[in-house]
Amino acid sequence: MIQYIRHFKILIAFLAIANIHNIILANDEIKRERPGKLFSPAKIPLLEDPGRDKWQKPEEILNLLDIKKGQTVADIGAGSGYLTVKLSERVGAMGTVYAVDVQQEMLEYIKKRTDENGIKNVILILNNMDDPKLPASSLDIAILLSTYHEIVNPIDFIKKIKQALKPHGKLAILEFTDESPIGPPIKIRLPEDIIIEELKQAGFTLTQRHLSLLPYQYFLVFTSSHQ
Ligand SMILES: C[S@@+](CC[C@H](N)C(=O)[O-])C[C@H]1O[C@@H](n2cnc3c(N)ncnc32)[C@H](O)[C@@H]1O
């Protein structure tokens, strides 16, 4: 009997090790594609899903970033403006939100939305793939929500965001984890360590790392390495 239990324990230990090994292999075997394809405006209803607040927890994100009235912030890769309108309310009439996107159709959607809701503190920017086209030293906070994986030359692009930040400005990046049951195809998702390394190369230091706040995404916050 004792022999049987010992064999059973060895088997369990073996299966546990094999499972860890498989997870590591599976992660290594994912063939990543960069950049991910641009999110189509035809899929805006996905961004505006009524159930999104429940898992996206936008108010908690804005609280953790300590966004205050009167601040200047940028929603880079703003899409339908899901976060833009929440930022607009948070910074108030004395604040400014730059809604930045490379797709004109996205900005048209946001324009309609802000016009209909009498929102006056949002400035739309049609940028290009290489340049966020934001004014220098203007931002308290820049946010890239589910956008980083679509950026063509991320290190150069992030360096330009750095120029747009005030000296103590923050840059927040949120992306879907490999484990999330929802989100873009796994091959275009990005492990957080790749982003942390690229941000380091662009001159940023990781200051906050929230891995369990959101069920489907990791949430990283950076500040400039040289204040
Ligand atoms: C998946 S959508 C996310 C939209 C929005 N942030 C959200 O979470 O609801 C990504 C958006 O980023 C935009 N985008 C991709 N690369 C960009 C870049 N280099 N600069 C600005 N916008 C970009 C796309 O056009 C698209 O609207």
Image: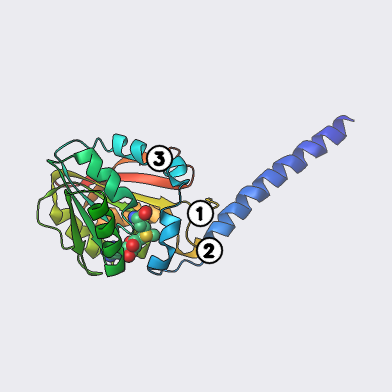
Q: Nearer the viewer, mark 2 or mark 3?
A: 3
Measured as percent of width and height from the top left, residue 26 is found at: 58, 58
Sequence-first disc among 3 and 1: 3
Q: Residue at x 16, y 63 (%)?
A: 133
The C terminus: image quadrant? top left
Does the residue at mark 3 contact the one at mark 1 (Cβ under 8 Å)?
Answer: no
* Disc ID at residue 178: 1
Q: Nearer the viewer, mark 3 or mark 1?
A: 3
Label 2: state its secondary structure.
loop
| Residue 27 seen by the camera | yes
- The disc labelled 2 sits on which kind of residue? Ile
Q: Would you name the residue on which mark 3 appears?
A: 57
On the picture, is 136 further left or further right than 48?
left
Q: Nearer the viewer, mark 2 or mark 1?
A: 1
Measured as percent of width and height from the top left, residue 121 is found at: 16, 48
- The disc labelled 1 sits on which kind of residue? Asp
Crowding near pointer 3: few (<14 within 10 Å), some, many (20+)?
A: few
Residue situated in front as seen by the camera: 105 or 141: 105
Q: Would you name the residue on which mark 2 appears?
A: 30
C-alpha gap between disc 2 and disc 3: 28 Å
